[in-house]
Image: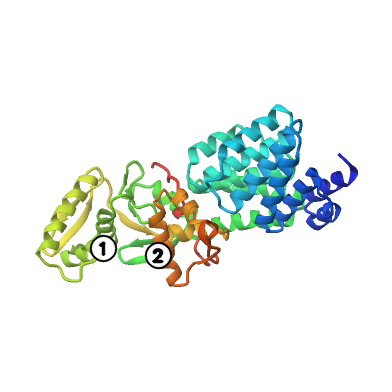
Amino acid sequence: MDSLITAAGRALAAGDLLGALKRVALRDDPPALALRGIVMARLGDLARAKALLKDAARAFGPREAVARARCVVAEAEIALVSRDLSWPVNALDSARATLEAHGDRINAAHARNLEVRRLLLIGRLGEAERLLAELDPGPLPPALRAAHELVAAGIAMRRLATGPARAALARARLAAEEAAIPALQVEVENATLVLDAPAAGLLRRGEQRLLLLEEVGALLASPTLVVDACRHVVRDADIVVSLATRPVLFALARALGEAWPGDVSRRALIRHAFRGKDADESHRARLRVEVGRLRVELQALADVNATKDGFVLAPRRTDKVVLLAPPVDEPHAAVLALLADGESWASSALALALGASSRTVQRALDQLAETGKVQSFGRGRARRWTTPLVPGFPTILLLPGPLPGD
């Protein structure tokens, strides 16, 4: 490798993007194309970066398997940043194996980190933890150590383990300072802010207050019966009943949890569950059926007792019932939670991350766009959706993935 390529690589590693670009801007040999692609990705021109890396991968000869594998890893990083979650992960796994076989442990570790970040985005926390545990961050350079600890912190926050999350972020901060890359330091600080911002609203007996992520974890570990509107479950410390695929039943549970210890009239329950303006006899009959189904679902946690005017929730294992709601109570809050990371998402990637159909996600995006909460650019398969970060709207409880005990 010639001296200009070496100097450009060192400048890139130090975060001097313009210095790296200056050294290879007029060259079209494969190493220069690859370096220019990485620089353009760091500068935000992802389409140009992707094209340069593809050109570089094609230009490398058959004996340059390591160089081609590095280009594949760089393409995977661009796909992750641009939220192209359907990018072929087998290609990344093959590239990582090639790098490991040739002793390039640094880039192999980076490939592994990208795999884990993708799994974290789509809520597969168990797989992400397993892969992350296979990687020893000790020998890694500071920038990769910081990236490793950020992923570890992300997994811990999604599991509401705030102690391990703070420890991982502290290690990430030290590594980012050692790397002396401002963008990385900002990423660590932004992740830290999530731990100190309201994560949910607690409604109990008509009173509401905001909870930090640490307080949410303590609440879910307590005997309190929680109607969780973030994950659409009803739970206590030991039992979790998911109603995520039963929207009518969860609407009833939410109304009963919000009104506890009082009851909810039949007319109000019909309005909550069926969106009916007038409670006719057919609505009342359906309400009786759905309440019966709710009783079956919640039988280990609570009874749903009839009163003179309606129904009341009667917990079996505790004397406390609360409703846990997102800090911004929005019908499509899960979509906004993903878009709030500031990146541009394809609707197909949102559907994959949320485990929903593309049609459902597109309908939600169209409704959000009508109210100005999201915006799109591009057309067809290149169309992307984004939104400004909503102040006071942390996303941890709304992102895909299980809470403790799920």
Residue at the (73%, 51%) spot, across then down: 37
The quarter of the picture where the N terminus appears is top right
Under tag 1, what secondary structure?
helix
Under tag 2, what secondary structure?
loop
Q: Is residue 365 above or below residue 220?
A: below
Residue at the (71%, 41%) spot, across then down: 58
Amino acid beneath label 2? Glu
Residue at the (43%, 57%) spot, across then down: 334
Amino acid beneath label 1? Ala
**Foreground pick, 341 / 79:** 79
* Lateral position of residue 76 relative to residue 67, left or right: left
Determine crowd level at label 1: few under 14, some 14-19, many 20+ residues with C-alpha closer than 10 A: many
Quadrant assignment, res 273: bottom left
Which x, y percent locates residue 51? 68, 51
* Lateral position of residue 31 relative to residue 320, left or right: right
Q: Which residue is mark 1?
A: 259
- Closest to the camera, between mark 2 and mark 1, is 2
**Foreground pick, 50 / 370:** 50
Q: Which residue is mark 2?
A: 330
Q: CA distance from mark 2 to mark 1?
A: 20 Å
